[in-house]
Image (cartoon, rainbow, N blue to C red):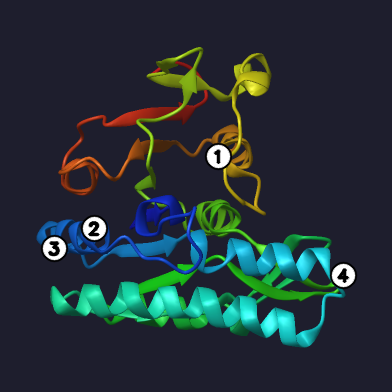
Amino acid sequence: MILLKIGGSVLTDKARASTVRKDFLRMVAQQIANAKRDDLVLVHGAGSFGHPQAAAYLSKGRSISDAWKTHRAVSSLNTLFINELHSQRVPALPIHPLDSITLDGGRIARFDMAVLGLMLENDIIPVLHGDIVLDSADGFNILSGDQIVAFLAQRMQPEKIGIGTDVDGIIYKGEKISHLNANEFENYRKEIVGSSVVDVTGGMLRKVSELVEIAKAGIQSEIFNATRGGNIAKFLISNQQVGTIISIGTK
């Protein structure tokens, strides 16, 4: 099984609320279709379809109405993505975290994976996304796509994990790192900055932190630029490195 996350920065214009990047949406769907993988789990970020709404929810009274607005926004992006996948004849169906995941203090406490498993058994590609979900400690909380990836990686032990973003990998002092040894992550932490636009999930630093934790459990992942034509296909169907590999030890 391959686990692939497409970042909200790829699918949406994060500087403009609820604005999809149609050309990239189509390009992503086409590359997934051309790879012809039926052992694929997709996760996508919320981008401008969730972060502005979530920021408003977190800064206000955390009402059910604002929680609904956040879920409605991220679900609409999920629908747009799956519609594009179906236009390329990719057999994809959604799994909304609000319906299947609960948190405790911001971390996943329960994830009903039965539907996901049945989808894979029937050659259906599950498509999950960042969402607002119930939290036993906080009422509701924001669940990032990156935390979903980390959780699934631990439970499913995928063959490959890819994180498609709008940058070439982990950039340190202006240069892309080819390989990040998870044990040396603290040496890089201060130089990894978050997004310049609203990102309630912590941006690149939080993304790398999640991947470092799964690397310490022996699970390798790769962050790459999904806006560069062909990179998704290369990741899905070849062993060619296209970004920064995060693992224990050297590549």
Sooner in the amino-acid sequence: mark 1 or mark 3: 3
Mark 1 to mark 4: distance in Å?
A: 25 Å
Residue 61, numbered label: none
Q: Are marks 1 and 3 in contact (CB under 8 Å)?
A: no
Rendering coords of residue 114 (x, y %): 51, 81
Q: Residues within 10 Å of mark 1 (few under 14, many from 20)?
A: many
Mark 1 to mark 2: distance in Å?
A: 22 Å
Q: Which residue is mark 3?
A: 36
Sooner in the amino-acid sequence: mark 3 or mark 2: 2
Sooner in the amino-acid sequence: mark 1 or mark 2: 2
Identified by mark 2, the residue type is Val
Mark 1 to mark 3: distance in Å?
A: 26 Å
Q: Residue at x 77, y 60 (%)?
A: 106
Mark 2 to mark 4: distance in Å?
A: 35 Å
Q: Residues within 10 Å of mark 2 (few under 14, many from 20)?
A: many
Residue 28, numbered label: 2
Rendering coords of residue 145 (x, y %): 54, 58
Q: Residue at x 39, y 27 (%)?
A: 244
Q: Are marks 1 and 4 in contact (CB under 8 Å)?
A: no
Picture quadrant where residue 63 is located:
bottom right
Q: Are marks 1 and 2 in contact (CB under 8 Å)?
A: no
Mark 4 to mark 3: distance in Å?
A: 41 Å
Identified by mark 1, the residue type is Leu
**In-image side of 68 versus 120 (left or right):** right
Q: Residue at x 61, y 51 (%)?
A: 199
Quarter the N terminus occupies: bottom left
Identified by mark 3, the residue type is Lys
Residue 211, numbered label: 1
